[in-house]
Image (cartoon, rainbow, N blue to C red):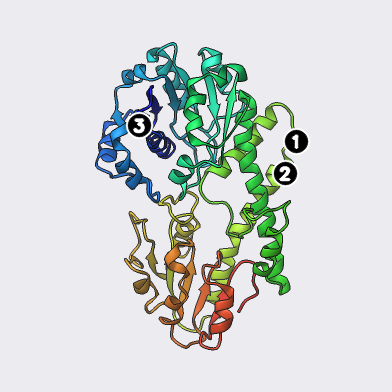
Amino acid sequence: MPQDFKIAFVGLTHLGLNYLVSSASKGYLTIGYHHQKLHLDAIKNYKIDYSEPDLIDKFKKYKKNILLTNDLKEIKKCKLIYISYDVPVNSNNTSDHKSIIKIINKVIKVANKNSEIVVLCQVPPGFSKKIRWNKQKLFYQVETLIFGDAVDRAIHPERIIVGCNSKKYFKKSYLAKFLKKYRCTIITMKLISAEITKIAINLYLVSSINTTNMLAEYCEKSGASWSEIVPALRKDKRIGEYAYLKPGVGIGGDNLKRDLETFKQISKKINSNYNLINTWHRNDIIQKKWIFSKINEVLCDIKKEPNFALLGLSYKENTNSTKNSLSIQILKKYRRYKFKIYDPVVELESMNNKHIQVHSLKEAISDSNILILMTPWKEFKDYKNYFDNFSNSYSNYIIDPFRCIDVSVINLNFKKFLGKYYSIGESVY
């Protein structure tokens, strides 16, 4: 059933596109603005740059409620206007907000003065209060999307966090009416508190990642098994079943690293302690060395010519993002060795003559004697793919930092698999 006012999303990068579909799913006529016509044409033809499960299917399902445009004047018709461009991040993980400020100023010039503006993009504390708009009609909404699960989290949020200047006004706002459609807890707070909440969420995640990796390393070196410890931790209510307890090769993507750098910079400005941020950063650098140390160990141990199979290019499963992906660094560092490379969604644009991208898992494994599983895609978790395609040889190696292959399976098949298996948090098998 159509709702009684229109909503605009200004910026259809990953962030805006997922929330556009979410808004349309609630029955609102939703206008999606983007400044590049070619980008809009691609979206209309379902050629979306961002690999997200169900995003295209959901876009098709709710497209009757979606109007795409590169004419910013269309937002005059909307009571609710979201600023939804992803913030550009440079190689030092520093956000560049110049383009966001520029588009907000353009929005202010054309928007109906009775409209409400909601900043959805990733901004530092104090950003929103500088926007020259009726303060009662200005909000900041914390986005908590996860690459690979974004559209589902946008449509079914666990809770919604809103920063506002007046909780009294918010209760009767268009934004409140819209958000009630999600039927979840809505937490309201001051604008700056909401901006810090976004950063705080990511810092707690980084804390969990660092603690997990530290403990997993100790388990690996001491003979303990991190995979045996995890179930006990999840049963502790102070830690919880959804805690980040899966060790990995450092922090991939750019969202967490961006907020680490943002908090460091804002802390400097007010002379607040940020020493822990520096420690986390150093730990991340150390953790990334794990994969290279294992590859070097294998190269010293192997008795025949090394033929690598690199499984996974994206920095995590269910996305095509290779931002801060260690797979790309591996290919650069070991460019003189033969690699067969497979990823279900990522296509490499350029390779050297010793690197071949293949189109199936079986093809990648065939004739390879060193497997590196760098992305925990679902299809990589079927252990039969590995043992059925590996010869019975001491010269075979599996480097599996994310434990795509269940450790118990390695134990059961160890007599058949005579090589070595490496995983973070587990002793070498």
Relative to 19, is 364 above or below? below
Q: Amino acid at mark 1?
A: Asn
- Residue at the spot of label 1: 273
- Residue at the spot of label 3: 1
- Residue 414 percent location from the top left of the image: 56, 84
Q: Amino acid at mark 3?
A: Met
Q: Amino acid at mark 2?
A: Leu
- Residue 126 percent location from the top left of the image: 61, 23
- Residue at the spot of label 2: 276
Is residue 36 visible in the rendered structure shown here? Answer: yes
Would you call the spot at circle 2 few (<14 residues within 10 Å), some (14-19), or many (20 or more)? Answer: few
* C-beta proximity under 8 Å, tags 2 and 1: yes
Q: Residue at x 58, y 74 (%)?
A: 407
Viewport quadrant of the C terminus? bottom right
Residue 328 picture quarter? bottom left
Tag 1 secondary structure: loop
Per the model, the C-alpha gap separating discs 2 and 1 is: 8 Å
